[in-house]
Amino acid sequence: MSNRPIYLDYHATTPVDERVLTAMLPYFTECFGNPSSNHIYGWEGGAAVKQAREIIATAINATPEEIIFTSGATEANNLAIKGVGEAYFQKGQHIITVATEHNAVLDPCQYLQSLGFEITILLVQGDGIINLNQLGEALRDDTVLVSVMAVNNEIGVLQPLAEIGAMCRQNHVLFHTDAAQAIGKITLDVQEMQIDLMSLTAHKIYGPKGVGALYVRRRNPRVQLAPQQHGGGHEQGMRSGTLATPQIIGFGKAVEIAVAEQDKENQRVVRLRDKLWSQISQLEGIYLNGHPTLRVGENLNVSVAGVNGAALLRGLQPTMTISSGSACSSTKTEPSHVLTALGRSQDLAYASVRFGIGKNNTEEEINQVAAHFISTVTSLRKQGSLV
Ligand SMILES: Cc1ncc(COP(=O)(O)O)c(C=O)c1O
């Protein structure tokens, strides 16, 4: 393991925390009962799921009944957007979202558009943050949903959730946020921020892959949601399917740890991130993508002038695992839709690197990464590698 590249792709996914794994293990073997079963095996599973649900609800200031378990944030986003679209069809068919959203939000919106909905896609400012006046102007009488992510997965910027929530509430429009990259990194409070639906996932916070949740507000207002998966009526009929007990237990444990350690871990990753930036920013022609301070501590996204993006990645990857653009779309050959939305040129959008710093990174690794980054850029520039 030790001679593998330094892992710096914590936005893409994270290793499962040993404490999370330990909590999950009994639910694969001894306590394997179906939480829906009315006998001792089922009750055991059901009690553990109940506890996980409570932990997750408490973390965002919701009630346990407002947590609907899903397979991850992609499914939660689909359920929120298509579920609201279908349930509020009679009220209106206009949805507002943002150009820098994850495809798991943009694509369900596009799907609704194919059914006749109108989708307004807000542009962002050069720093990646939306303009609230533009949101205000986009709201209409037939708007049923505003979907704005909490933390961007590529550039780490934070959107003004409380301000968006207040505007939506005032206009009687539901507010959904994709918080896949936010839980455990920033404090989320669905009451204070007036959020009506929130998508979560476990695998970005040292939990297992394949589990997430959708928070669905039950009071003031009670959100109506059309299920997107039909069957046994689990999760109050909103998401049928046998609950993935071990994953849910792991999700609960991961949230518990992430929230408890949030402040300490944030301080540590900010220190490492700032150290990395202070070294690599000494290069000429290097640009920080996204707002310099309104961003999560673990993220550093930079564009480098005068180098070819693919050559840069090839040069860096033996030493470090990083992504260019978002990992979920890294097979695409177009430049990142997030960076182009910031107004970056094609060349700068291609020649971009997303560093995602996490729990296992050390100061020594960051120094190594900075030195290798500087030498790679310098040598590519000497070779004149723009092609
Ligand atoms: C902002 C954002 N939304 C949604 C997703 C998809 O989450 P999941 O992998 O849990 O489906 C991701 C993961 O890449 C993400 O970063």
Image (cartoon, rainbow, N blue to C red):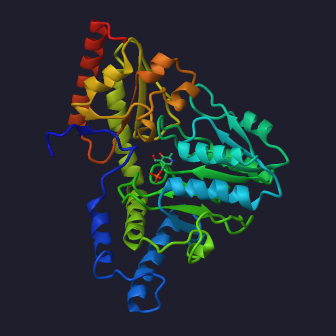
- Across the whole image, how many numbered discs are drawn on residues? 0
- Left or right of 33: which side holds 53? right
Q: Where is residue 173 in the image (x, y as percent from the top left)?
A: 76, 52
Any part of residue 291 in sight: no
Question: Which residue is farthest bottom?
Answer: 39
Q: Measuring from the top left, give residue 191's x and y in whole percent.
A: 65, 60
Image quarter where the C terminus lies is top left
Q: Residue at the far right: name it.
A: 141
Image vertical order of residue 281 relative to residue 150, above or below: above
Question: Is 278 positioned to the left or the right of 362 in the image?
Answer: right
**Vertical side of 156 occupied by 170: above or below:** below
Residue 39 falls in which quadrant of the image?
Answer: bottom left
Estimate the x, y position of residue 209 in percent, counting from the top left: 38, 57
Please name whichever residue, 366 or 176, is drawn nearer the observer in this view of the structure: 176
- In the rendered structure, the answer to whether residue 312 lies left or right of residue 235 reads left
Near-viewer residue (41 or 262): 41
Tell me the residue at 26%/33% (across/down): 320
Residue drawn where x is 44% and y is 42% of the image: 328
The residue shown at (54%, 31%) is 337
Image height check: is 29 above or below 8?
below
Quick one: 124 or 350, which is closer to the camera?
350
Position above or below: 21 against 266: below
Residue 314 appears in which quarter of the rendering? Answer: top left
Is residue 230 among the parts visible in the rendering?
Answer: yes
